[in-house]
Image (cartoon, grey):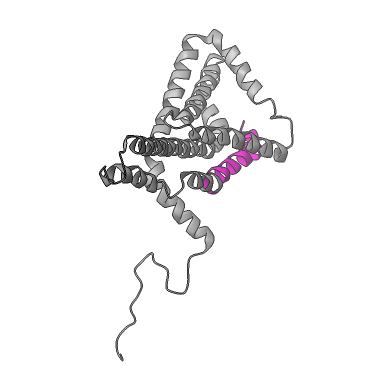
Amino acid sequence: MDGLNPVEPPAGIPPAGRPPGLARRLYQDEWAVWRSHYRKYFKYAARALGLGFVAGYLFFSLWPAQEKKALEFVVQSLKDVSLQASPLVLALTLFYHNARASVVAVAAGMIPFLFVPIFDPLLNGGVLGLLVSIAQHQHLAVPRLILTQILPHGVFELTAVLYATSAGLYLSAAMGRKAQAAWLKKRARRNAGPPGSHPDFLETYPERTAAGLAESPARNVVRSFVLVVLPLLLVAAFIEGFITPNLR
């Protein structure tokens, strides 16, 4: 009708005929999964990182004789990383090393109920505690060490570790629910009498539980790893390879 303004679409909803691009849709889905599933596990992962740091720092501060053995173990785990390599090679090697470790941490979430990925931030926190303890015993400037050698790349790397752990914990919980649903379904069928002799809810409850997993936790985790964890690790690796050595 004349004189009437066209109806504007609500804020945040793209106009009709202009669907969001693939990248935008992927990250919108990722944001939804973060809010629905990962956020609570991220808190647990952050606490595990802090606990690992405090425990590692206190242990090596009280028993400094153990620092050498622990440092040798850390160096051995990083034997494929050459600090004398060019910045590009160093960055790519660090990226590969950290991505491989994150894959293992996330894949551990395939084990239902045990929440094995939580050990990744615990271990990383313990290593940070070890480094701070060593720096303190060698009378180095600990605040400067943290600000120049840990924090620049650590902001991205540790965020990636926590996010990967969150995805792994979510996967472990989802696999646990899936295993429980399968067990309930099997038990319901085993305990059922002749057809029609038992209430329908005994048969449908496991199916409804399993239906809640239709969003495919494994697919969510793979998407999270590609969209969030790998980019964060890549940024951290290039900072550690190109910028951190110049901040001594």
Q: Is residue 239 above or below residue 83?
A: below
- Seen as rendered, the residue at the extreme bottom is 2
Residue 40 image point, x, y percent = 37, 39
- Seen as rendered, the residue at the extreme front is 194
Taking the spot 60% from the left edge, 37% from the top edge, the residue there is: 99
Residue 213 image point, x, y percent = 41, 46
For the N terminus, give its image quadrant: bottom left
Q: Main secondary structure of the magenta part?
A: helix
Q: Which residues are magenta?
A: 227-248
For the C terminus, give its image quadrant: top right
Q: Is residue 72 above or below residue 188?
A: above
Taking the spot 53% from the left edge, 14% from the top edge, the residue there is: 137
Q: Is residue 79 left or right of residue 10?
A: right
Q: Is residue 238 left or right of residue 30?
A: right
Q: Is residue 230 magenta?
A: yes
Residue 154 versus residue 180: which sits nearer the camera? 180
Q: Is residue 244 magenta?
A: yes
Residue 123 image point, x, y percent = 51, 24
Q: Is residue 8 left or right of residue 226?
A: left
Residue 160 versus residue 246: which sits nearer the camera? 160
Residue 59 versus residue 38: which sits nearer the camera? 38
Residue 68 image point, x, y percent = 60, 12
Q: Is residue 93 left or right of residue 140?
A: right
